[in-house]
Amino acid sequence: MNRLFSSAGVALLAFAVGQGLAQAASSDIVVNEDFESTPVGAIPKGFVKTGEIGVEEGVAHSGTHALKIEPAVKGGRFITLAPDKVAALGGEHWGRLYYKVATPAPSPVAQEGKKVAIIHATFVAAKATSPLANDPIELRLAGLILNSGGDFRYLYNVQPKKRKEFGVHSKAAHQFDDEWTLIEWHVDYATQTYQFFVNGEEVTDLALHKGAGQFEGAEIPAALQTLSIGWTNYQPASGEGFTVWIDDLAIGKHRLGPVPAAK
């Protein structure tokens, strides 16, 4: 992936933001998980899992443990937060995680009847009721679209159950490079705001600021019903599929900032 900060820059950002934004009151932090206390092969307490996913030792952004998403050609491998924790988020929250994709990364597989081969993948998804149409929706709060050349763009999109999905993607293209990448997201029902950050820098062409009561094109709900973290690719991938690691997950009411990497 294109790195938006040098190692020194990320270290300085970690210090500066860590002293400011990351000093949220403990009551504002709903999830703060570095996976260090979770046994290998298990998932953290307070989550349930879907698919092949569990903690691995030896690959980590900080410490020695991270959540490993096992390879699969297609489908979801994720952990879902307990309902009481989801309810505590209300209509606004911030999230943070680090991810790394094993390289060489898989490619999209051509599908019959499709002119272009792509993979749409999601790290963070939430189920809710649309404030616009009052129907079931899934918000993909941190996702990407990968093309056959190995380039991907970050994506926010909403998938209604019976309506056409919609979304917005970043203009800049990236490629997986086996490095840890920090992503952050922010949603706010009151202002219909969505923001996304990569390595501390906002991806402004992904941002939505619709305004109070302006639900069309955003549909950020007043409350989430579920919140899941992991990896789902909706189209088939070549070979065994994607192997992905996630570490230093945090979700709360304020921006939580970066975490220094293991030395």
Image (spheres, rainbow, N blue to C red):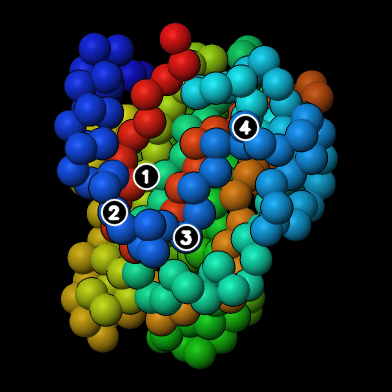
Quadrant the N terminus occupies: top left
Secondary-structure class at tag 4: loop
Instruction: Check disc 4 and give the amino acid type.
Output: Glu
Residue 82 vs residue 217, the one in the foreground: 82
Instruction: Check disc 2 and give the amino acid type.
Output: Ala
The nearer-to-camera label among 1 and 3 is 3
Left or right side of 48 for 219 = left
Ranked by sequence position, the earlier of labels 3 and 4 is: 3
Look at mark 3 in the image and give the residue it sits on: 30
Label 4 to label 1, Cα distance in Å? Answer: 21 Å
Label 2 to label 4, Cα distance in Å? Answer: 22 Å
Q: Which mark is residue 36?
A: 4
Q: Image quarter for residue 48? A: bottom right
Residue 117 vs residue 71, the one in the foreground: 71
The residue at the point 26 percent across, 36 percent down is: 18
Q: Which mark is residue 184?
A: 1
Q: Can you name the residue that lies furthest to the bottom here? A: 134
The image shows a total of numbered marks equal to 4
Q: Which mark is residue 24?
A: 2
